[in-house]
Amino acid sequence: MESVLLMKGGDWCRAVRAASAGMAVVMLVSGCGVYGAAMTRSQRVLSQRRAPSLEELERAEPERGRAIRKAVSRTGLLLEHAKVGSVSGSLTEHEMKFEVSWKNEARGALSAAVPITRDGYFLTAAHCVNMESLTLVAFDARRRLVNLPARVVWKGEEADLALVHAEMQPLEPFRLADGSAIPEGTRVVIAGWSGAIKNTAPPLAAGRVKQVTGWRREEASGAVWCDVEHDAPLNQGDSGGPLLTLDGGLVGINSLLGFEFGGMWRALLGIAGPLDQPFAGYNGLAVCPDAGWVMRMVEADRARVR
């Protein structure tokens, strides 16, 4: 104690600052650990809620449930920096089988893509793509599973949205709905490629719209879009997939998931909430582009490549 009392004023201040910095580092590391644990736990809880959320919808409205399952067979798989080993699949009125063997040649991503035209234009999330080394796997108009190189036509800077093209005729394009007109509480379904992709259809989940932002515009490109917040359980790998209305309309493109502070602690404790609200404090986000703007981008690209 005596040695501390005899320290000069400057030394004492430096010691206090060093101790404070050390404490801040400890708190930061501890906080990151808690947040990381919560995110890991939340992914597990959300994954467990996917099937029940859809089963509830199918029990309540079986015809719509079947139509949704049929609609998502159009969802493509987008691989980045991939060397595809083999692709095989079959599609019937009642069953979809899908098997892909692939290997990353470099650091890359696995995501989804949504066909919007009959000549191979797809929407996906901007954070899933770079400007090269993309492979698209999807069923074509003849119900054959194909894998083809894809190119990035446009990639948003503010909007988490990208337009890609592959030389194919997809099974059937989605029609783009007006996301800004969808009321709060509307029942929606998401599809994507989270989890295993061997012998499986795209995993599905159901939820409700929580809120919709107004239209936004990206100055650099002129992109027009709104954000649709929902509570359908969304996991990594679902990015770029469709957020659908119950009649199969394309509301938007899966973008990201987030947690309010209370949701993070619920995740850490493993509290998922009731089926019609899969995760209290959880927010899924989809980007809904203006249909007119998207088609202008498509027409401009068609003119360039003719």
Image (spheres, rainbow, N blue to C red):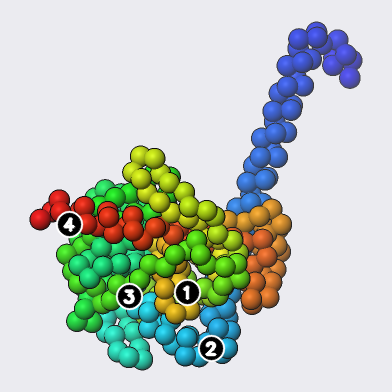
Please tell me whether mark 1 sits on a helix, a strand or a loop: strand
Mark 1 and 2 residues: CB-CB less than 8 Å, in contact? no
Disc on the earlier residue, 4 or 3: 3
Give whichever of discs 3 and 2 has the lower sequence position: 2
For the residues labelled 4 and 3, say whether their Cβ atoms are less than 8 Å apart: no
Residue under circle 4?
302
The three-letter amino acid code for the residue at tag 4 is Arg
Q: Position of residue 236 (x, y in %)?
A: 47, 62
The residue at which mark 1 appears reads as: 245
Badge 3 is on which residue? 74
**Of the image marks 1 and 2, the number of the one nearer the N terminus:** 2
Q: Which residue is mark 2?
A: 61
Is there a contact, CB below 8 Å, between mark 2 and mark 4?
A: no
Label 1: few (<14), some (14–19) or many (≥20) C-alpha neighbours in 10 Å? many
Which picture quadrant has residue 39? bottom right
Q: CA gap, disc 2 to disc 4?
A: 40 Å
Q: Secondary structure at mark 2?
A: loop
Against 86, residue 29 (above or below) is above
Give percent across and percent down for residue 51: 53, 79
User: Disc 1 marks which amino acid?
Assistant: Thr
* Image height of 144 relative to 218, above or below: below
**Name of the residue lying farthest toward the left:** 306
Q: Amino acid at mark 3?
A: Arg
Q: Residues within 10 Å of mark 2 (few under 14, many from 20)?
A: few
- Helix, strand or loop at label 4? It is helix
- Where 303 falls versus 78 (above or below)? above
**Amino acid at dot 2:** Glu
Q: Earlier in the sequence, mark 1 or mark 4?
A: 1
Separation of marks 1 and 4 at Cα, in angstroms: 29 Å
